[in-house]
Image (spheres, helix red, strand yellow):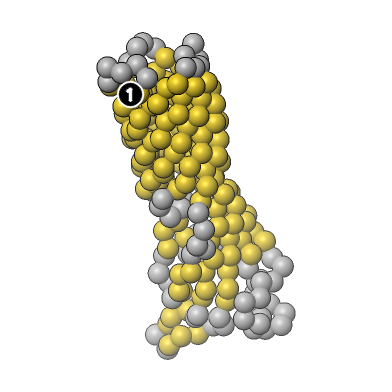
Amino acid sequence: MMTFGVKGGAQLTSSFQFKEIGMFETEAKYVRPILGLTFEKPLSQTISIEADALYNPEKYRYHQDCFPTKQGCIGQPLDWETHGHTLEFPVVVKKFWGTDIRDRFFANTGISVRSMTMSSWAPPYPCDPTPPPSGTFCDYIQTDTHGSFGFVFGGGVDFRRGHFHFYPELRYTRWLGNEWSGNNNVVNVLRPNQNALNILLGFTFGK
């Protein structure tokens, strides 16, 4: 019998890697919630296959003081913000251990794909007024997208009560790509992080 339910949690690592090009990093400080659906199909008493569809909102803000050159620092200060979301679709094989039919440890491994879409607020050049007031965003939006493939490793405990399952899990994903496509508004500043560590809580119904 297939089990199905919801999965939530939080991302413990940053979604981006910052490139040092004369800018000072100011990452938005907030919990990156993860929400989604989960499905699991038992293959035997100790082996099952799980598929998830997960959504993760993203936000990053940074400040540019100037562009470094041989002649010194040039350019005007600039605040920049990018926000969007990530969709992730992991499929893993789970192996269970334990003699207690109610509570069992498990480890899993598999593959995942992700799609990241980010919209960036930034002033065009030149911005009117020039320079813009500090902390002001000009009405200018560009969109960048990213897609990549990765490998998943994780483990946790499955607590079973009747037909209901509750399972906390720690999951690591190693992504193989970090390139953007689109208008390239964030390419020179941020790269998608190739390492992701998430803590997840699953609630499912089924045998």
Residue at 48 percent across and 42 percent down: it is 9
**Residue 152 falls in image quadrant:** top left
Outermost residue on the front side: it is 161
**Residue 206 sits above or below residue 173 on the image:** above
**Residue 70 falls in image quadrant:** bottom left
Q: Nearer the viewer, residue 12 or 103?
A: 103
Residue at 42 percent across and 14 percent down: it is 42
**Residue 193 sits above or below residue 79 on the image:** above
Q: Nearer the viewer, residue 15 or 150?
A: 15
User: Could you classify mark 1 by the number of other residues whose Cα lies within 10 Å: few (under 14), some (14-19), or many (20 or more)?
Assistant: some
Q: Which structural element holds mark 1?
A: strand
Residue at 42 percent across and 63 percent down: it is 18
Residue at 52 percent across and 58 percent down: it is 30
Question: How far from the left and from the top, in percent, is residue 88?
Answer: 51, 38
Please state if 121 lies on the left or on the right of 50 as rendered. Answer: right
**Residue 105 sits above or below residue 140 on the image:** above
Three-letter residue code for mark 1: Arg
Residue holding disc 1: 104
Q: Nearer the viewer, residue 149 or 182?
A: 149
Question: How far from the left and from the top, in percent, is residue 106?
Answer: 32, 26
**Residue 168 sits above or below residue 58 on the image:** above
**Residue 102 appears in view:** yes
Please state if 201 lies on the left or on the right of 107 as rendered. Answer: right
Question: How far from the left and from the top, in percent, is residue 109?
Answer: 34, 29
Question: How far from the left and from the top, in percent, is residue 32?
Answer: 51, 51
